Image: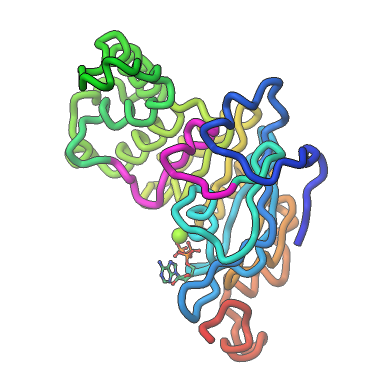
Amino acid sequence: MFHSAGRPPKVGVSSISIAREREAEEPSPAVSLTVRGLTVRFGGITALDDVSLAIEPGEVLGVIGPNGAGKTTLFNVICGFIAPQSGTLEWKGQVLTGVRTDRLARLGIARTLQGTGLFAGLTVLENVMVGAERFRRPAGFLPAMLGLPRSDRDERALAARARAALRELGCEELATRLPATLPYAVQKRIALARALVAEPELLLLDEPAGGLGAPELGELGARIRALRGSMAVMLVEHRMDLVMSVCDRVVVLDFGRVIAHGDPAHVGRDERVLEAYLGREAERGSPGDRPGAAR
Ligand SMILES: Nc1ncnc2c1ncn2[C@@H]1O[C@H](COP(=O)(O)OP(=O)(O)OP(=O)(O)O)[C@@H](O)[C@H]1O
Ligand SMILES: [Mg+2]
């Protein structure tokens, strides 16, 4: 277990309604996600085993590890897709209980999924507008009761935000296209636009480089580096070249446990990390002895 320095002090609130988070954030404490003692089991598999880490404001934190190490499970717990058997999440010094995926954006957390996660039946613009929903003004009681359509002004405002996000990523001219008609790498960029349009304080990326070629990888690296300082980023990734070039710190998972953490160069030399990646099982005992192995 490790705790990073500079974590904001706990404010003594044990449980909060996510809907109240934004209202409660003035004056805004430092952005920081702290994960403590997360354990997730799927039947006999321990996907996460007492995982603790912290993400500091403006930093790019890499989460790496071999296939099945628990990276996506960690990501899914933070997103609220999976409820852990034990452990806590703290966001800006307040404990989160029962994170709801549909409320994440209002918390200031956005994500891209392993794959693209785009809606096949929506245009590129509509997909990105989904990411901008948190900026929609709440409908008045009467219009909602009467089932009146959302105001055109609201729709135009969301569309303008979505277009700006697409422009930022060089995809504005693709607004009317359906995702499936576009190359995979472009779909990944649109998924990133959908996350960024929410103006998150924490961006969670699950294998954003998956399926990308070398030039696109370089471009993605430059984009992530440009985000540094303006938001915290948790980058779950296999591509070590990307991780090494953009991350301030790296956490390494293996069989659900944190086996190393620190700056990328340090982690890249760590014996346990090399073993995990090279799969030197023989030197580590039988797989049944390993944490997280099927029991
Ligand atoms: N829904 C599930 N049901 C059962 N087992 C699961 C489930 N999700 C994950 N697992 C198991 O939990 C472990 C961790 O999986 P996870 O997907 O988190 O790994 P990962 O590090 O993201 O791997 P990859 O690099 O292949 O994406 C694996 O053993 C996996 O088979
Ligand atoms: Mg994964």
> How far across and how far down the image is residue 105, in percent?
47, 33
Residue at position x 44%, y 46% in the image? 208
Closer to the camera in the image, 235 or 295: 295
Residue at position x 38%, y 30% in the image? 131
Closer to the camera in the image, 262 or 22: 22
Residue 222 visible in the current orientation:
no
Region rendered in magenta? 97-118
Ligand number 2: quarter of image: bottom left
Relative to 182, 77 lies left or right: right
Closer to the camera in the image, 225 or 241: 225
Most extreme residue toward the top, as rendered?
Answer: 153
Say which quadrant the C terminus sits in: bottom right
Q: Is residue 106 magenta?
A: yes
Which quadrant holds residue 69?
bottom right
Q: Give the vertical position of 258 relative to 144 (above or below).
A: below
Residue at position x 56%, y 38% in the image? 17
Q: Give the vertical position of 110 relative to 173 (above or below).
A: below
Q: Give the vertical position of 207 relative to 172 (above or below).
A: below
Relative to 14, 124 lies left or right: left
> How far across and how far down the image is residue 11, in percent?
77, 38
> How far across and how far down the image is residue 35, in percent?
66, 52
> How far across and how far down the image is residue 81, in percent?
44, 53
Relative to 57, 73 lies left or right: left
Relative to 1, 114 lies left or right: left
Say which quadrant the N terminus sits in: bottom right
Residue at position x 35%, y 50% in the image? 115
Which quadrant holds residue 15?
top right
